[in-house]
């Protein structure tokens, strides 16, 4: 993998296992936000959220477009979580990142405040040279091609970059631009835009040795 100069990491359910429950708590709080703010039943809130996510890439983008939701109030509410209750320092991940010589970047639809909390608890904040969050993307989220164009403006060459994400739809535009794509922690699938599949983030070492 000598051709890979930059590794782009998603954050949630990628740098930590989905079994931690952290993203599930974020999702629960999104549900509460929708239910309370729009006076919907839980069932109707689920339907609305699913449609917005599928149509706009994130629930927030849909709420901004259709409901004129204040993005900062939404982000503050749904990410008002103590990450220490779900995560802990990950020595295995620290050792992995110490051994990766390539440039490392976070590319996420989450806000910076959430990113920094997660990285701090895991003990890995020092390894990343840049963090591209939902604010950096002007609230245009992955998997939008516009989000990837903003990523590449940071002088990242797609064909010299690898992206690791738990959401397969985020890998489709990445592959279109020429990135090497890795799906982590979800069901293995044979989509043509997925180059590699790993069970957990520390398995990436096996791929980098190739």
Image (cartoon, rainbow, N blue to C red):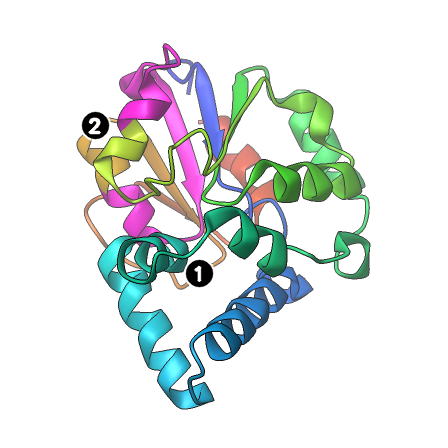
| Quadrant in the picture for the C terminus | top left
The answer to whether 196 is drawn above or below residue 199 in the figure is above
What stretch of residues is rendered in magenta?
A: 149-172
Residue 44 can be seen in this image: yes
Picture coordinates of residue 114, whole percent (x, y) = 64, 44
Picture coordinates of residue 202, whole percent (x, y) = 61, 42
SS class, disc 1 = loop
The answer to whether 153 is drawn above or below residue 97 in the figure is above
Q: Residue at x 34, y 43 (%)?
A: 142
Picture coordinates of residue 123, whole percent (x, y) = 78, 35
Q: Which residue, given by chain and number where applicable, does mark 1 sit on? A: 186
SS class, disc 2 = loop
Q: Residue at x 37, y 71 (%)?
A: 49
Q: In which quarter of the image is residue 95?
A: top right
Picture coordinates of residue 197, whole percent (x, y) = 40, 49
* Front in this rendered view, residue 104 or 197: 104
Gap in angstroms between the C-alphas marked 1 and 2: 23 Å
Q: Relative to residue 13, is residue 39 drawn left or right? A: left
Residue count near mark 1 (Cα–Cα under 10 Å), binned few <14, some 14–19, many ≥20 = some
Q: Relative to residue 11, is residue 34 drawn left or right? A: left
* Front in this rendered view, residue 127 or 52: 52
* Residue 115 on the magenta span: no
Q: Which residue is drawn at 21% across and 28% down?
A: 177
* Front in this rendered view, residue 126 or 160: 126
Residue 179 can be seen in this image: no
Q: In which quarter of the image is residue 195?
A: top left
* Front in this rendered view, residue 89 or 133: 133
Q: Which residue, given by chain and number where applicable, does mark 2 sit on? A: 177
The answer to whether 55 is drawn above or below residue 179 in the figure is below
Q: Relative to residue 162, is residue 143 drawn left or right? A: left
């Amino acid at each position: 993998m000598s051709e890979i100069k930059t590794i782009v990491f998603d954050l949630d359910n990628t740098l930590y296992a989905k079994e931690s429950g952290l993203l599930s708590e974020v999702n629960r709080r999104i549900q509460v936000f929708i239910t309370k703010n729009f006076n919907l039943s839980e069932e109707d809130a689920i339907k609305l959220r699913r449609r917005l996510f599928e149509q706009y890439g994130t629930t927030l983008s849909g709420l901004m477009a259709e409901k004129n939701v204040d993005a900062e109030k939404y982000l503050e509410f749904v990410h008002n979580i103590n990450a220490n209750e779900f995560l802990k320092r990950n020595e295995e991940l620290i050792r992995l990142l110490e051994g990766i010589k390539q440039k490392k970047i976070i590319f996420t639809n989450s806000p910076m405040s959430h990113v920094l909390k997660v990285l701090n608890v895991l003990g890995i904040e020092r390894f990343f040279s840049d963090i591209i969050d939902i604010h950096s993307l002007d609230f245009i989220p992955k998997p939008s091609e516009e989000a990837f164009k903003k990523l590449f403006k940071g002088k990242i060459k797609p064909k010299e970059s690898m992206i690791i994400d738990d959401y397969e739809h985020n890998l489709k535009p990445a592959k279109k631009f020429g990135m090497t794509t890795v799906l982590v922690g979800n069901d293995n699938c044979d989509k043509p835009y997925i180059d590699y599949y790993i069970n957990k983030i520390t398995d990436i070492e096996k791929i980098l040795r190739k």
